[in-house]
Amino acid sequence: MDMERIYLLFEEITGADPEKNPLIIERAVENVRNRVKRSEYIMHKEVEYLIALYAALALYEKETASGITEVTEGGGVIKAKGKNYRLEMAKKMIAEQEKVCSGYVEKLPDNSFLFFSVKGGC
């Protein structure tokens, strides 16, 4: 797998610096790596794009949950609606890319939850 390409895809999708988000990307890699049907499939460009999309989704979830506002160059504030839109679009893009990768990656069960990180214990 080409991590440099995944970082570039992540940056292209999100506009965020991948060097500041390595854990999000690494968790997305592990998520997909655990679902590939054959180990060599992780190197397919379609699968790398799926990884970048999962990393983007995690970033958007983090931003949406944090409640941190962003200021545009013109001084305007990006409202939560914009963040929610990005979150929903990322989910749609992942659903489409999962279809493209159906020959390479095991399908998630319809009722499954996807956790990128769990800290602490019971």
Image (tube, grey):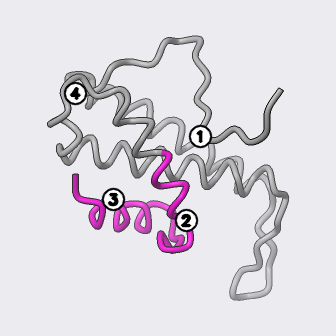
User: Circle 1: is it few (<14), some (14-19), or many (20+) Cα within 10 Å?
Assistant: some
| SS of the residue under disc 4 | loop
Per the picture, the main secondary structure of the magenta-coloured stretch is helix
Horizontal side of residue 103 vs 28, given as left or right: left
Q: Residue at x 68, y 47 (%)?
A: 61
Q: Residue at x 83, y 26 (%)?
A: 122
Q: What distance separates the C-alpha of mark 2 from that of mark 1? A: 13 Å
Residue 102 part of the magenta segment:
no
User: Circle 3: is it few (<14), some (14-19), or many (20+) Cα within 10 Å?
Assistant: many
Horizontal side of residue 22 vs 99, given as left or right: right
Residue 104, labelled with which disc?
A: 4
The answer to which image quadrant residue 73 occupies is bottom right
Q: What distance separates the C-alpha of mark 2 from that of mark 3? A: 12 Å
User: Circle 2: is it few (<14), some (14-19), or many (20+) Cα within 10 Å?
Assistant: some
Q: What distance separates the C-alpha of mark 1 from that of mark 4? A: 21 Å
Amino acid on which disc 4 is placed:
Tyr
Residue 21, labelled with which disc?
A: 2
Q: Earlier in the sequence, mark 2 or mark 3?
A: 3
Residue 39 to residue 7: above or below: above
Q: Position of residue 22 (x, y in %)?
A: 50, 63
Residue 9 to residue 49: above or below: below
Q: Which residues are magenta?
A: 1-27
Amino acid on which disc 3 is placed:
Ile
Q: Earlier in the sequence, mark 1 or mark 4?
A: 4
Q: Which residue is mark 1?
A: 116
| SS of the residue under disc 1 | loop
Query: Is there CB contact under 8 Å for labels 3 and 4?
Result: no
Q: What distance separates the C-alpha of mark 3 from that of mark 4? A: 17 Å
